Image (cartoon, rainbow, N blue to C red):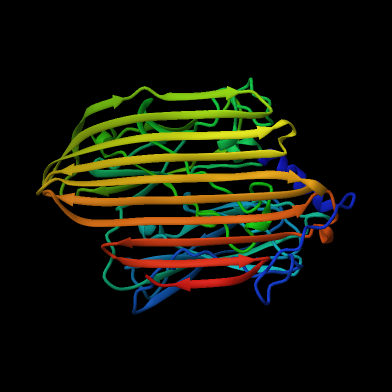
Amino acid sequence: MSMFAGATLLASTLLGASPAPAAEPADVPAGVPAEFGTDWHDPITAAPPVTEPSGKSCRVTVAEAQFRDFTPYKGTYTPPRGCGDRWSKVVLRMDGKVKGRQFDRLGHLHVGGVEIFRTSTPEPSPDGIEWSVEKDVTRYSDTFRRSQDVEMLIGNVVDDTYTGVIDVKVTLTFYAGRPAATPDRVLTLQDGTLTTPRNSERIVAEVYATGSGGGCEEFWYLSVPDEAPYSCKAAGGPYREVQIKVDGQLAGIAAPFPHVWTGGWSNPFLWYVTPGPRAFDVKPIEYDLTPFAGILNDGRPHRVEVSVVGVPEGQSGWSAPVNVLVRQDAKSKHVTGKLTTHQVGDLANSSTYTPGSEHQVDTEGSHRLTVAGYVDTSHGRVATTVSRTLTNTSTHRWTDGENLDALDATWGDDELVTVDGRGPARTTRTQRTYTMDGSITIGAGDRLRTVLTLGDRATVGTTQAGRRIAWSWLDDTVEGDASWTLNVPRDQRHAVGTTSERYRLYGSDGCYDRSLTSVQGVLTEDRSGC
């Protein structure tokens, strides 16, 4: 069964249909029910909390709303009083609650047109759940220094069947103290164009790219070539790549993160307590556009476009808003420069369909881009070189009727940034690896089972003058196994499920290690320690 079909099937299942046999009993830990009931532990993740500086702080409510439809919340943000206008840290917190019956929903928050937060929601229990998300948003300090319009939207549908009203409150907490080093300007595109200050010396674009909307692009990693008999088709198969262009010239490439929302893989019982990586805090893709500063700093608007390779022409389903973070040379009115290198490798994208009783699509994709340029600043010439290499391999297997649907996929995004000027050259290498290995099967008695492992991994190392000066290693892995009976009323699904997450972050700044396990919605393990 396709993941897209699973979303449609879930809707019909909630309405109820003919009965089916119960699941076979399984051994469960003491104090854990034999199957899911009408309530479960509030959603929780193993990710580290945002550290809070000591000293004085000020809190501002940015949005408070109940989302019942697709009407955005609109308000006004006013800077805090009593904590100055240069902060050591700014922390966003969203508190949410919902009860009844509802799908997972995507949401965003804009302040002054800048997207500072993108999220998705958990699916509720009949008795109701509460959850919270924290995010370090210090880098948007330039936006927070002025009164701004606020827009927040978590699109929702509430009717006689889907009764869950999503109730949220978002605050910003500002910490006084030694100001953090933050971008001087945070810009958005105006009619698809960007005008940077003429003294910009570092320019970074960030793109909150998500495939969503309820169609096949929500499960883009399962797309197959047109000749394959599967419910989600794309001529080029599942390879996706998020590109950014400046005046039509390719300026950055990236592998999108394969998000799994809390109704994903046809099995919300996997995610009721622990969501997949990044589901509640969608991280933006970052592109270092500094090699293009010499072009962008002429005081004129330049067209900046984001596109997703592999999306069938005319098909919607991707959202990719752009923020641009700029650091300026305070001692120069105009920073000049030049793009010196622009090397675009061939885009390799091959999806091979093999028919049989078990159909199979094997995909291999890769791409490479190197750009380099310099800027002449008040403190001398600074050259920046950015090289990025993307890889993707996947094997997708399914049977007629899609009663078996399985994927084993890996995405690699390897980035090397070297900044040479004002002292020894500094090189930062970031190696990102995303993994997905899972299957859906429908067995006897219309029993649907999903087994899935998701991985979000990254290693970062910075060297200067041949010496490593900083490093980190991240591994966020979520594993789940859940089953439920199709085509029956909600109270006859006899759902069971175990989900675990281990989040490990080691590096020159310290160590963090936390593990969570839930069984039938009961949190059975919450362990921390390095």
Residue 100 on image: x %, y %: 76, 63
Which residue lies most toward the right here?
18
Give me the residue at 67% from left, 55% from top.
482
Residue 341 on image: x %, y %: 22, 28
Which residue lies most toward the top here?
227
431 vs 368: above or below: below
Residue 158 on image: x %, y %: 76, 55
Give me the residue at 23% from left, 33% from top.
372
Quadrant in the picture for the C terminus: bottom left
Give the image quarter of residue 182. bottom left
Toward the viewer: 437 or 503? 437
Give me the residue at 68% from left, 39% from top.
404
Left or right: residue 387 compared with residue 70 = left
Give the image quarter of residue 74. bottom right
Give me the residue at 18% from left, 36% from top.
374
Toward the viewer: 279 or 72? 279
348 vs 485: above or below: above
| Residue 265 visible within the image | yes
Which residue lies most toward the bottom here?
55
Left or right: residue 298 compared with residue 399 = left
Residue 173 on image: x %, y %: 44, 70
Quadrant in the picture for the N terminus: top right
| Residue 96 visible within the image | no
Figure disc tally: 0
Toward the viewer: 104 or 526? 526
340 vs 476: above or below: above
